[in-house]
Amino acid sequence: MKHLSLALCVALAAIVAGCGGAKSYKITGVSADVAAGDTLRLFDYDTDEEITSIVATDSAFTFEGETEAARIAVLKKGAKRLSVFFLEPGEIALNIGEHHATGTPLNDKDKELTDQVIAMTNHYGQISDSIKALELSDDVIVAKIDSLQGVMDETFTAFNRKVFEENKDN
């Protein structure tokens, strides 16, 4: 009976510890804009309320804490916005230079969607450049690019609808 009680206590302790850890976050990053002694502040995007702050020891930084729910966060050094990302439980890696965060479900999904938008935008730019390279009158070029813009608008609208439908219950 003692072994069963001890095993039950250990299991209960593991469950309680696991529940507490589920709200914990750790944010790591490196930025050329950060130096030893710089104060970095994390804000709630919607309320502009400061969540926490740290003093950097070098260009690498780490924030650790807990959050009750996922929210959009802004990392600032003074007035300069370094990053906007989803603050949620888990380990978040900020890539300041490339303007994205990874390591948690919302940040990974955001990066995936951003990469798709960038690919569509680049494709639009290539087609637009190809049209401009044709030996056509300015009026015809403007009409073709306007038509292409209409197609791109429809594509982005369909993309946004698809993303919304796939994620509205998250």
Image (spheres, helix red, strand yellow):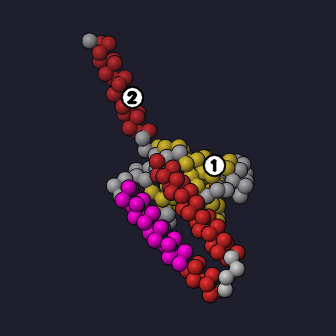
Mark drawn on residue 140? none
Q: Which of 86 and 76 lies nearest the eye of the viewer?
A: 86
Q: Position of residue 138 (x, y in %)?
A: 66, 86
The verdict on residue 157 being magenta is: yes
Question: Does residue 162 appear to the left or right of 32 in the view shown?
Answer: left
Q: Could you tell which of marks 1 and 2 lies nearer the N-terminus? A: 2
Mark drawn on residue 14? 2
Residue at the image position 63 percent from the left and 81 percent from the top: 141
Q: Position of residue 44 (x, y in %)?
A: 49, 61
Q: Which of 88 and 130 lies nearest the eye of the viewer?
A: 130
- How far apart are labels 1 and 2 at the CA level? 30 Å
Check disc 2 and report its element: helix, strand or loop. helix
Q: Which of 102 and 77 lies nearest the eye of the viewer?
A: 102
Q: Amino acid at mark 2?
A: Ala
Asked if one can make out residue 69 in the rendered structure from this viewpoint, the answer is yes
The verdict on residue 163 being magenta is: yes
Which residue in the protein does label 1 denote? 29
Q: Is residue 67 above or below residue 127?
A: above
Q: Which residues are magenta?
A: 147-167
- Do the CB atoms of the residues marked 1 and 2 lie less than 8 Å apart? no
Q: Position of residue 113 (x, y in %)?
A: 51, 57
Q: Amino acid at mark 1?
A: Gly
- Secondary structure, magenta segment, majority class: helix
